[in-house]
Image (tube, rainbow, N blue to C red):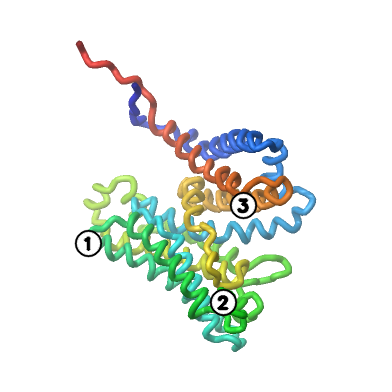
Amino acid sequence: MIRLDKRPNPSKAWSYSTPLLAVLLTMIFGGLLFAALGKDPFVAIRTIFYDPLFGQHAFFYRPQLLVKAAPLILIAIGLSLGFRAGIWNIGAEGQYIIGALCGAGVGLAFYPTVSFIIFPLMVIAGALGGWAWAMIPALLKTRFGTNEILVSLMLVYVAENLLRGMAVGLMKNPEGFGFPGSRNLAQYPSATSWISQNAGIHWGVVFALIAVIFAYILLTRHMLGFNIRLAGQAPRAARFSGVNPTRLVLFCLGTSGALAGLAGLFEVSGPAGQVTTDFNVGYGFTAIIVAFLGRLHPVGILLAGLLMALTYIGGEIAQSQLQLPAAAIQLFQGMLLFFLLAVDLLTNYRFRPKQGAAA
């Protein structure tokens, strides 16, 4: 029998090196998984991590890396603010969906009008949609003391049903021969987020970089950032120092919802191109891994988002070239969070044998 004893002073160097160790362990055990599936583990790992950056077609995959990372970084930045303050928004996937629906709705409402003002209106609508959806668990928590984890998570399923209803109902393309899905926004100049479709870059990449910069300034140079860190590290001290918990909940959940809504808007007006029944691909949940892999630090989240995007693109290459099943790639990605949590446990706690009771 063993017990866990909290370390009084965990090593900072070890704490910052745990993400790298988690990635290394993921490669090792992922390689064993691929070997069990009858694939060469070295080829599989190289295909996932090396080929998108330096392989034969890297010039094509590198812009995709930024586009894939952008929604993960945007959502993870918002989540990290709440996580630092002890406010747990697990429903970013729902806020991502609602932001996409609101933004796409504005664009489709103006179709086929061509005007430079339409896309900015879509951006505002996407952010407001995600913000409003996040305000539901925020207000329920501050007014009635409900658990934001459960409420935000349950709202994901509501958002998914709204998405399906819109794709086959109000937003369905009237010229789509009855197939579910909206008009193609990528072919509608005023409603597309592409900066350069030939280069494969859209505005979501720019907004993700801006979010990283602003989050860094907020956490390191602003009193609100200090209050966020204080509320997470010493809740009692935060209360005694006059930090308003209601305002903190509203700010953290509202900001994370707005950023998730922006991520949905940029995705539906860029790579996805239209509202479909299967538009959401789990970015809201994957961003949780990105946030913790980046140690809830804006720069760390930027790097973690690029790494996770690399596994997405490399995983797609491995599926097509090595015939690896999609479930194996998803399990490989999930190993990142599993090993990160495991190494964090060893960083902050030590195992001790339980002493037997005296006879």
Instruction: Identify the residue under disc 2.
Output: 182
> Left or right of 258: which side holds 57?
right
**For the residue labelled by badge 3, is the local secondary structure a helix, a strand or a loop?**
helix
Q: Quadrant where the C terminus lies?
A: top left
Residue 142 pos. (x, y %): 25, 62
Q: Quadrant where the N terminus lies?
A: top left
Residue 325 pos. (x, y %): 63, 47
Q: CA distance from mark 1 to mark 3?
A: 40 Å
Residue 44 pos. (x, y %): 69, 41
**For the residue labelled by badge 1, is the local secondary structure a helix, a strand or a loop?**
helix
Q: Indicate whether 98 appears above or below 22.
A: below
Could you tell which of marks 2 and 1 lies nearer the N-terminus?
A: 1
| Disc assigned to residue 117 | none
Report the residue at 39% width, 27% height from top: 350
Report the residue at 56% width, 84% height from top: 117
- Mark 3 is on which residue type? Tyr
Q: Nearer the viewer, mark 2 or mark 1?
A: 2
Q: Can see residue 216?
A: no
> Left or right of 119: which side holds 86?
left
Residue 166 pos. (x, y %): 48, 75
Q: CA distance from mark 2 to mark 1?
A: 38 Å
Q: Can see residue 40?
A: yes
Could you tell which of marks 1 and 3 lies nearer the N-terminus?
A: 1
Based on the displayed image, in which of its 4 quarters is residue 147 positioned? bottom left
